[in-house]
Each structure stands twice: as C-alpha cells, then as structure tokens.
Amino acid sequence: MLAEKNKKTKEVMSSWIKKVVKFSNKQFFDRFVIGGIILVGIFWFGVTFLQYQEYAYRTGDTPVAEQAIWNTAHGRIFYQSFLQVDTNLREHLNFVQILYVPLYAIFPHTLTLFFIIQLSFVLGSIFLYLFVKKRISNLAGAIAVGLFVFHPLIASQAVGDMHVVSVAGPAFLMLLMAYHEKKYRAFAFWVIFMVFVSEFVAPTVFLVGALAFLERRSWRWFTPPALGGAGLFLAAKYYITIGFGSSANILSKFTPQAIMSIYKIEKRLDLIAQSLAPLLWIFTWISKYSLLLIPSLMIALFIIIPGRIAGGSHVFILIPPILVLIFVDLLEKFPNFKRQIMAIAIVGIMLSLHPWWKHMEIDASDLTAEMDRAVEMVKDGGSLTASTQMGPNLCRREEFFLPMNEKMTDYVVLKTSKLTKSKNDLENQELKYDQRIEQSGLYRAIFREGRVVVFVKKEKIAELMKVAISEVEAMEESELQDRWAKVERRVGWLEN
C-alpha cells in the first residue's frame, strides 16, 4: 500500500516537473523572466518611495552617505561633515561613490541613489539569467535569478538604509560570471571595479586570485585579483583613520583573546544560517566557489557587532552572487542530479521569502504629518542637525550632522524621545543633546508639535527676518512662529 502511494507521489512530481520544464522552453519564457525582474525593481522603488515619504529610515547611514555625494556634486569631493574629517575616505575607501554623482547632480534626491542601486540589481539579474540560460537551461536561469533577487541580503540593500557599496553585489556577480566563462577582459574590468568599491571586499577579491591560481595556474588570471585585493588592503591600512572601517579595528578582532571571547554567538550563527539558507547550509560547501564565502563568514563570526548586523548588512553583499555561482557550478559538475539541485534551490528560495518580505515592510512613523511640517520650517541651506528619521529629507547641504555630533548648528530638527533615560547609548546621547539645546540660550523653538521640535539659532532668525537679535529674544512664541512661517524658503531644488 505504502509502495503504491510512493509510486503515485513520484509520478505526480515527475509530471509536475515535466510541465515546468515544458513551460520554461516556451518562447515567451525569456520575456516572462526578464519582465518579472523589472517588476521586482519597480516594486523596490515603490517601497523606497513610501519609506522616504513616511520617514521610515531609522539609522543615520542614508543621510550621511547622501550628504557626501551632495557635497561631491557641489565641488567638495567626498566631504561628509558628520565625520568631521576632510573626506569620508578616512572611514571607508568607497571610491564607488563617484558612480552616483552624474545622475545625482541632475536629480539630487535620496531616491536617485536608490534607483541606481536597484537598477544595478535589475541589470545584474538580467545578465545572470542570460548567462545561466546559455550554459544550462531557461529554468535553471530563472532559479538562479530567484536565488539572487530573493536573497534577504539583496532585499536589505535594495530597500534598506542606503549604502553606496551595495552595487558590489551585482558587480561581483559580473566578475564571477566572467571568471566562470573565461572572459579575461571582462574579468579584469570587474576586478578593477571591485577594488574601487570598499576595503571590506579586499579579502574576497584576493581569494578570487587564490582560486584562479589553484584552478587555472595562470598569472593572467591570478595577478589582477591578488594584487587588487592586497593593494586595497594596504591602502586601507595606510589611509583609513576613523570609525568601524579602521584596519586597526578589524585586525584587532583576530587576536586569540578576541576570538575566545566572542559574544552573542546565536545571533552570529543566525545571520550565517539566513545568508546560506537559499542553498541549505551544508549543500553550499560542495563547490570550489565556497572558498570565497570565508571572509564574509569570518566577519559575521568575529568582527561585526551583533547590534549593527541590520545596519551593517552591506558588508555581506558578496554572499548572494557567490551562492548563485555555487548553484551554477553544481549543476555543471553533477549533470545527472540537475533536478535534485534545482529542487533544493527552489526550497531554499521559499525559505528566504519570509525574511526577504520583512525588508519590504514599511515602518512608517506615527508623526509623519508633524515631520512634514517641521521640514518646511527649514528656510535655507544653513548648518543643520536632525534626528535620523528626518535626515534624508534635510541632509542636502554643506554641513549636516546627527544628534550624536552634539553640534550647535543653525537648525536643530528633532523627533524627541518619550523617555527621560534609556538603556540605549545613542538614545541617551540624543536626550542629552536635546536638553543641551534647550538650555543653551542660543535658540528659539519655532515649531513644536507632538514630539517634533525645530530650534533655530537666534542669529539665523535675525538674519532671515532682517531684525535685531534683541527683537528675536523679545518676541512671544506665537508671534515668532507666525513671522517665521512667512519667511521665504531659500532652499532650492538643488539643495533640498
């Protein structure tokens, strides 16, 4: 009885697989897959539009990164005032920022940056489909696209806080496809491109050289990635001086004492499990390309602070393209097990859909209307400090800071906390900063609704109202707010 039931199940499965394969061979299948990729890209852009409108960005990564690009477009190359150094290359060697500048100079908006990132994922996915289709089959190409597009790490960089290095995902995919097809010129081009992304890719790029040495034993294939990876590491060690990008900080994590004192191991292992889930963990390690996963997994285990996993997920963006090439490599290495390998990949994609979808949820602020009105209270491009949620709407200016900088800027735009004390250090910093502004005597509150408040320096109010500071100090709050509302905004479309 059980044998008959199993036989029927196998027949049903075999029939279903035959139908899928038959469908994938239809002429319109290419248009179906490529159209699906484009629709995903449009969906991503819709999500980011709503996130921007609803003040849903909870970290400062987006506005401070954008401000450096805004300054670059205005002649101040890679100047990011938040860092308080001459160039943000002192924190990360993100030369790839220059890629964003031409289009951003025409359309200076946060969504322009997301559009470039999302477009890179869309184009990379289309090239991936055509690559796998040519080498294996239409169906395998569609599954490979699914492994890439629906990976949670891709989702986090497509719609999460903006990181200019997110384009490393599709760029590394192009590098690996060129390597796999032995297209040397394309391979050399993408190696050079990767070297200009950021220092965190250096170990992985170097390992591409190691793989080429072991597999092809040719200096032509080994030299570019080996020199590129080593050169990028040395450049980072010499030039980076601040922040989490400091090579000294990274290297210090690999002391025996640091390794023995790893904390929150469950969170670290969960990150690794989620990252490898599309190929079901153990299955991943059967391919030669698994060598390239080692740096990312070492970062997850020993370097990244668990509390920064969400905000720092861009450093794991090389994992999805590596998994895709592992999938392709396995299909070619074990042609007799193609159906089983593709079935495992489909199960992996299904497992990834829930965490992928979580990234699409819009964490809208409960004070959106108040923040909209607060943004309108900023009248020119003067120096400004803003809470992280309002940062993307106000960062397009030469001097922009977050509350943790504790700067006495012309404008201070805050979403104040409900708390008087918090266990979170960053929240405590913001609480202290809010109190410092209130008590400084340098500001007047020209807007206060709910927990949203806008302070403006008395000198700035006097300048724009064309009155004496003593008159500003003497005004009743209601009169001040009425007169301030009538001041013409000088923040043009190039600035805000």
Image: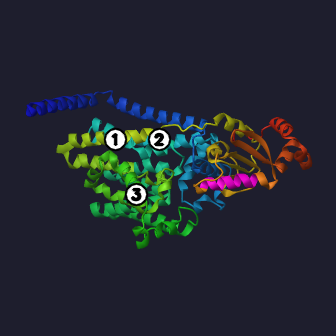
CB atoms at circles 3 and 2 under 8 Å apart? no
Q: Is residue 432 magenta?
A: yes
**Mark-to-mark CA distance, 1 and 3:** 21 Å
* Name of the residue lying farthest toward the front: 420
Taking the spot 84% from the left edge, 50% from the top edge, the residue there is 459
**Span highlighted in magenta in the image:** 426-437
Quadrant the C terminus occupies: top right
Instruction: List the residue tagged with mark 3.
Output: 296
Could you tell me residue 372's position as x and y percent?
A: 68, 36
- Cα separation, mark 2 vs mark 1, equals 14 Å
Quick check: marks 1 and 3 in contact, CB under 8 Å?
A: no
Q: What residue type is labelled 1?
A: Leu
Amino acid type, label 2: His
x and y percentages locating residue 58 in the rendered image: 57, 46
| Residue, disc 2 | 359
Position of the N terminus, as image quadrant, is: top left
Q: Any mark on residue 351, and which?
A: 1
Can residue 444 be seen? yes
Secondary structure at badge 3 equals: helix
